[in-house]
Image: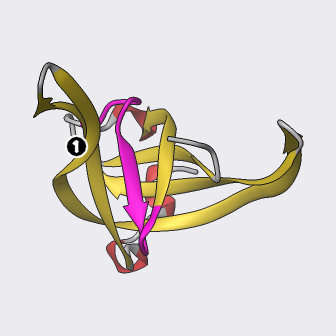
Amino acid sequence: MQCCDIYPGMLRESVELQRQETVSIGGGATEISYVTYATARGFMKPLSGGERLYAERLDAQTRNRLILRYRSDIVESDRAVIRGRAYNITWINNLEFRNRWLEIDLSGGVAT
């Protein structure tokens, strides 16, 4: 996708960007949780889907591409929540290195 192929009117999905944090729950124990650090508007395009057999269980997997306005604070260890469903970020591309749009590959259906 090129920068000129994207229009602001395409950004219809509300996207929560979440970062993993370790929280102390007392007694020296910790718990990993996700905290929303930003909300943005984006365009999501499905790329592929399928199923795989894992540990004697059938798991569904999806691959999607998300387009957002450029942000410098997103990293691959974050996740995106769209319509209540969490997706792992697998790749971030600054389109044409122009700092206008980000193309983000997401995987869903995988344990987070």
| Relative depth, front residue between 4 and 102 | 102
Q: Is residue 104 magenta?
A: no
User: Relative to residue 99, is residue 40 depicted above or below?
Assistant: below
Residue drawn at 72 percent across, 56 percent down: 47
User: Relative to residue 83, is residue 36 depicted above or below?
Assistant: above
In the rendered image, the residue lying farthest to the top is: 28
Q: Is residue 14 left or right of residue 60?
A: left
User: Relative to residue 42, is residue 68 depicted above or below?
Assistant: above
The answer to which image quadrant residue 76 occupies is: top left
User: Residue 52: x and y, percent?
Assistant: 87, 45
Residue drawn at 55 percent across, 47 percent down: 106
Q: Can residue 31 be seen at all in this image of the molecule?
A: yes
Q: Is residue 106 left or right of residue 76?
A: right
Q: Can residue 99 be seen at all in this image of the molecule?
A: no
Give SS at disc 1.
loop
| Relative depth, front residue between 112 and 70 | 112
Categorize mark 1 by other alpha carbons within 10 Å: few (<14), some (14-19), many (20+). Answer: few
| Relative depth, front residue between 55 and 85 | 55
User: Relative to residue 77, is residue 88 depicted above or below?
Assistant: below
Numbered range of the magenta stretch: 74-85
Q: Is residue 77 magenta?
A: yes
The type of residue carrying mark 1 is Arg
User: Residue 1: x and y, percent?
Assistant: 58, 51
Residue where numbered disc 1 is placed: 71
User: Residue 35: x and y, percent?
Assistant: 20, 48
Residue drawn at 84 percent across, 48 percent down: 57
State how the image is colored.
Answer: secondary structure
The answer to which image quadrant residue 55 occupies is: top right
| Relative depth, front residue between 91 and 35 | 35
In the rendered image, the residue lying farthest to the front is: 27
